[in-house]
Amino acid sequence: MPPKKENKKDKKGAAAEFEEETKFQAVVLTDSYQNRFRPMTLDKPRCLLPLVNAPLIEYTLEFLATAGVDEVYIVCCSHGDQIEDYIRESKWSRPWSPFTVQTVLSPESMSVGDAMRDIDTKGLIKSDFLLISGDVVTNIQFDKVLQAHRERKIKDKNSIMTMVLREASSMHRTRSKIDPGVFILDEATDRCIRYEEITVDSTPHIAIDPELLDESNDISVRNDLIDCHIDICSADIPALFQENFDYDNLRKDFVRGILTSDLLGKTIYTHIVNDSYASRVENFQTYDAISRDIISRYTYPICPDSNLLDSQTYSYQSGHIYKENDVVLAQSCMIKSATVIGKDTFVGDGTKVDFSTIGRKCTIGNNVVIEGSYIWDNVTIEDNAIIKNSIVSSNTIIKEGAIVQSGSIVSFGVIVGKGQTIPLDTKLTINEDYVDEQDDDEESSNRLVGSDGKGIIYCESDIESDDYDEDDDSIGGHNRGALNSLVSNFYQLNVSDVSIASLSQPRKKTRRRYSTTSVTTAASDLSDLEDEEEDFMREAQLSLDRAIFENHDLDIAALELNTLRMAMNVSYHEVRLATITTLHNHIFRLVLTDTLDVKSAVNKVHNRWYPLFSRQVFDRDDQEDLLQIVLDDSSRRPAANAAKALMYTVMSFYDNDVVEEEVINKWWNSDAVKASDEKTKELLAKWIDWLQNAESDSSEEESDDE
Amino acid sequence: MLLVFKSVIRDYDTPSGTTLSRNLTAYLSHQIDYLVTARPLSVSMGNAIRWLKREISIINIDTSDTVAKRELQSLIDTFIKEKIEASGQVIVQSAAQNINDGDVLLTFARSEVVKQTFVEAHSQGKQFRVIVVDSRPLHEGKKLVSELASEGIKCTYILINALSYVMSDVTTVFLGAHAMFANGLLYSRVGSALVATSAKSRNIPVLVLCESIKFSDRVQFDAVTLNELSSPDALLNISINSNSRNDTLSPALRDWRDVANLNILNVLYDLTPAEAIKKIVSEVGNLPPSSVPVILREYKSDYNA
Amino acid sequence: MSDLTLKTLTHHHKSDKDIFFQIDTFISQLKRRQITGSNDVGMATAHLLVRFVSAARWTHIDSLISDLRLLGKRLIAAQPREFACGNMVRRVLALIREEIHGNNENGIDNKGLSSSSPLITSMFNLLSTEDKSIETANNEKKTGRDLKPYIIEGIQELIEEIRNIEDSIAGMSVEMIHENEVLLTPSPNSKTVLEFLRRASQKRKFSVLVTESFPNETEIAHAFAKKLAKAGIETVIIPDSSVYAVMSRVGKVIVGARTVLANGGCISASGIALACEAAKNHKTPVLAVTGVYKLSPLYPFDVESLIEVGNTGKVVDFSDKDMVENVEVMNPTYDYVAPENIDIYVTNIGGYSPSFIYRLVLDHYSSEDNKL
């Protein structure tokens, strides 16, 4: 019956080579090394903030208990003493706790990397361990995951890590909208090939190294996964952090680093869960979403009525309502659906509560409206107040008739004065350290909380600003950082959803799974002509790109192109199109990165690669076609440099005898050119003039030479 | 289906030596037989065919083919408009009157009229809650519930096993119909009978929304005698997404065909007893189930007129 | 968890610590739903009680009783919808009380543990005294510590009872099923039902319709059907929704129960109530097979509080964003079956009509312990 017996059994089943005595260890990172939960985290560590009336870390520890972990190390950074005290007093330190808990204070660490290095220094880890952040809520069956990990380890000695991911959809409410990760996976083995983080200001596409496509057969690019930061790591991971002291962030630095580095030769796998719940409280948006998930019992058996804390006495009522003992509800108050109410809380007459969580010892007056909000412990809300989609922390008072509008965060100890209105997405705190200096704080905040109130507006320090959606002002029209501060909801979030959705549109198409085999045979069996052309374009560009970057021999590049052309049965026109597009891509890359100016870039590229055209351009019609392609191409480029580039390209064609003068003249007079924009014409006109004059000159010179 | 017949008639040429009214019927019969091989005819299809044949047979022998064809085509158009589209709207209007503020409504699977009724009542500003009961393997209710939710109607979604858990709160049950039999029984998506009888035993009124074209003069006692079977393999997927790419096959049943004595039965419809039905809302008014044969008689005389 | 203060145990004693450890481990396992199913929970509780009683030291028997009540309360609080632990504690309490008060009335004591004698389904059987009462009569005068071995023995017998439950119930199956009958069972998770049918198939030929109990136990249901088929029984799997459609062909409905309540109703897996209702509509008899240890002295005043609500993610795929965000979804895992929808309870001590259950409750529990 005691859990130990079970654990041993599990392990025996898992892999024979693991001795029974090996203890399964887990490292819990309590700190996220971010400030997303400020201003609350100024006073209390994040993992002790209540989520559906139980401290966040309880959910993680509960998972570890079911996962059959034997030893838990809790790494604390900010407010480490508070966490230590909490753990010491909790049930996890009792003798019957399913695992031993030890808190590791690491106050000087500034990042996950630092914490890992600290762990390595202390030499705590002896075998494979579970690295988990202290804000995970999950009910996955861990033994399956562990078993899969161990089987993989036997197959692939270089596998050092398994990341547990939950399948969702890209705009799922429980998926963080700040820096969601994109995973590129090998379909067959679940091996993670690349990891990219999408920041809001990054370009809406990710670059995939073509070599990746060669390496494996089927890959999928997925932007629909919830990264719940449950990783099974091998024992040498802390050491890897030690060796690479620039690794700070677990995903952005470490995972990317390992995957992109050829030297280490390590592999990372993923385990995608689609039948149970897993997610992480990363910011206020996920705080809201996960609270709702817990209340709607997606996390079963981790629900309010399983009473994670011993002192809790929640029981369930139809409509997802949970109440503790000793809740006093007035006769006429309306508790609608999906609500949790803690012990000794009083709710007055005519009050409406919907989709909310109310902590212990709260006093809620008459005719109050609470919707979609999280009221922590010891909160007094006086008559006729309205609170919507906000978080109200412990020991606060919302006075009579006050209105707290959506997205607001009222931190510890704040008092909102009588009849005051807290506007959308306001963060209030009593902590004096983080006041916006530019504001005339005293007055402006007094204006907010009223003369009988207490509290000031918390302003994000600059460190955090890069986390925020810079477009946000244009989107929602409210505070920057709205993505994070948006406690929940509806209108605003929907608006910002749209903006992100539009960003992610082009990204989505990459989710289509395509298979690539070797370059030459790819898609040769596709019969659809259009498809072939598209494929050809892609393949040809890839092949040329490679040629340019790796500085291939010209003949090889030409040969490859020719093979492709024949394999896919396309005309020379496509070949020319592909060549020009690639070369110009390259040119503009050089220009954009300020490596070279337009003229030298064009000359450099064309002088190196013009002989390609000798195998693509055979008569005057072809030459004309080529010019046309160049013109079309330039019309798609950024206007500033396009005209110049076009001119220099045509010049280089002329200089290298790719195109004959007569053709240029003919092309110049064609309708297409006339239809092009003014700047292009202006530049070209000069040159054509010169050309026509020069011609006579040069013929003269030639004759002179003779 | 009627649209197809319309084009069949348009493309039809009377063979020489016969008259249109005689030959077309036989001609159509072949098409109908072909349809039957694809899927058993539903009652509404049968009724429509019967009506069409009658219309054909009463065409005056003297009318020219082109005129007759044009007439038939316009008749079909009016039939569609009257019996299917307009009757749907009439039902929606009258059924929506049965919804009051504060009601908890329950429906099973997915019926277009039922959905329209809820949407209509919602647009009239009525405050109510809808419980959608769904069942495996079709999960039709899932579509309904997301449609209703996107209209802003407050919805609860459960599977049929949870029915008795929620039944006590329900004020009215709305069911769609596949057919109404002449003995007052409702022939509808399998599970409807469970919902209706369970409501009946708690004295919750059950309303059936049914166009009169679905009334049938067939009589039947239980669902086993005549029913439509669906593929047993549909039950093998135990994932909750009927259409998902990650089908999860039940591990125990992977090889069920090899196990002697093991069978899977997946019927599509069942019969709800007339006592369980409070009233039928159709375009000819609100009726008790016992009035179905009366309406049928009227129709017959209608057709004969 | 340390708030459990038991007079008979001290935190200082080493072996006592061990007991505390076990109690708390068991409680957290209950909370995490690591132990589920009335059979397993009942077993585990009984084992825990054996250890508890053997470790306990008392001067007066009342302190043991109050301690047991406290323990029972804790266990029930850990998982209020798992009745087996409460039942076990109550059974043990009744046993102790009986030991104290002796048994002079020579009567309505039926801890009869089916033993090897063939079961008679007559109700008069109930009144026949069994050998136990003689034993207890002898202990009449003994108090305090002396009772310990008897209590432990009593609990051991309880464990035996649970262990042999399938056997004794299955023995009656032949009487209940006739040749070529069509049966329907909506509770494929019940081991008792499986044994019942298997045993019957040795003598009779019949076919069984098995519902899927989607979404909570579909996999189990499929495996159950396969087991039946392997045992040579003609088995048909049907979706839950088609229960009514096939009911007209069904001769008997056989259900398992998680808990039998004092009013004769029972708590069972979700979907069963519906099947029983459909059976009633067709006047098809419903048999509930259950062990006596599942009897609970409680009345279902608040049905809702007896029903566990399970994982919503089993009804709606969590990645289905629109559903998760906009629709309230519920997944109750239990059902309450009203007594009028059950025709007969087949238990290890015989068959009883639901209206008689209250009497069985009186026999097995002492009424002082109904509320722990």
Image (cartoon, helix red, strand yellow):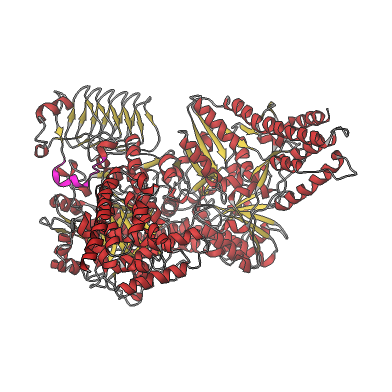
Above or below residue A413? Residue A240 is: below
Looking at the image, residue B3 sits to the left or right of residue B125; the answer is right
In screen coordinates, is C217 left or right of A146?
right
Residue appearing at x 23%, y 58% in the figure:
A697
Q: Is residue A293 magenta?
A: no
| Residue B150 seen from this side | yes
Residue extent of the magenta highlight = A460-471
Among the 4 quarters of the image, the one containing residue B221 = top right
Task: Residue lying at the far right in this picture: please name it.
Answer: B17
Residue B132, percent across and down? 53, 40
**Above or below for C253 versus B108:** below
Q: Name above or below for residue B81 compared with residue A546.
A: above
Identify whether A406 is placed above or below A667: above
Quadrant in which the C terminus of chain B is drawn: top right
Q: Position of residue A80 (x, y in %)?
A: 14, 52
Q: Decide if residue A507 is on the left or right side of residue A32.
A: right
Residue at the farthest bottom position = A17
